[in-house]
Image (cartoon, rainbow, N blue to C red):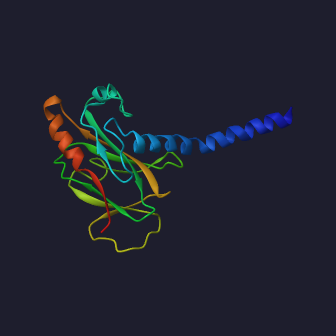
């Protein structure tokens, strides 16, 4: 019947519309309660995974991609209580990236990394759209469309001998409150 088709169509549209929110809500709960294999990760904290993705898969990490030339870091950003600062150390030419994913749309809205911002160390102001406060000089501003985001980072490790150096750099990519 036409009514059943209309209802089915509306349910399908609703599912498509809300799917990113459902998926990222689940991912947020996993990060905050379970983490990336090293225990829960509090909101506004980044955790660097010390093992390669294939090694961390055996410990139950959420991130297991099949590529072993990067170490991952991740966390959940929330700027509702005020802006945060993403600190990135000097990467000395090493590939790294931090991707910002909007939990409402599922789209990536910003990247910090070798290809977009270079490998010089620095700080990035993360704030709600239209935030009007004292913006520190020298910080690049990234507006977080829905005031929260999934952050996934990657730091290149050339081989097993380079893994410790890559991990030391990954641990220095941190979130802090704006002072």
Q: Position of residue 147 (x, y in %)?
A: 47, 58
Q: Is residue 88 above or below residue 178?
A: above
Q: Is residue 69 above or below residue 93?
A: above
Total marks drawn?
Answer: 0
Which quarter shows the C terminus? bottom left
Q: Position of residue 50 (x, y in %)?
A: 24, 36
Which quarter shows the N terminus? top right
The extreme left residue here reads 161
The extreme right residue here reads 1
Query: Which residue occupies 62% across, 44% down?
Result: 17
Q: Position of residue 61 (x, y in %)?
A: 35, 32
Query: Which residue occupies 45% across, 44% down?
Result: 28
Query: Which residue occupies 25% across, 32% down?
Result: 51
Q: Is residue 34 above or below residue 103?
A: above
Locate residue 122 relative to residue 74 in the image: left or right: left
Quarter of the figure with residue 162: top left
Quarter of the figure with residue 67: top left
Q: Nearer the viewer, residue 35 or 17?
A: 35
Q: Nearer the viewer, residue 30 or 16?
A: 30
Q: Position of residue 56 (x, y in %)?
A: 30, 30
Query: Which residue occupies 35% across, 37% down?
Result: 36
């Amino acid at each position: 019947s036409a009514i059943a088709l209309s209802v089915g169509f509306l349910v399908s549209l609703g599912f498509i519309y809300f799917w990113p929110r459902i998926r990222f809500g689940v991912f947020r709960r996993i990060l905050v309660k379970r983490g990336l294999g090293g225990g829960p990760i509090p909101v506004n904290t980044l955790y660097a995974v010390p093992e390669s993705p294939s090694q961390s898969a055996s410990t139950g990490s959420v991130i297991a991609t099949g590529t072993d030339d990067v170490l991952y870091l991740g966390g959940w950003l929330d700027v509702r209580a005020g802006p945060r600062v993403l600190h990135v150390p000097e990467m000395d030419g090493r590939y790294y990236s931090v991707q910002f994913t909007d939990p409402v749309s599922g789209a990536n809205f910003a990247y910090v990394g070798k290809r977009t911002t270079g490998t010089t160390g620095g700080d990035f102001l993360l704030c709600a759209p239209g935030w009007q406060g004292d913006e520190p000089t020298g910080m690049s501003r990234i507006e977080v469309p829905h005031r929260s985001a999934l952050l996934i980072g990657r730091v290149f490790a050339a081989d097993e001998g380079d893994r410790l150096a890559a991990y030391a750099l990954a641990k220095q990519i941190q979130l802090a409150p704006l002072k």
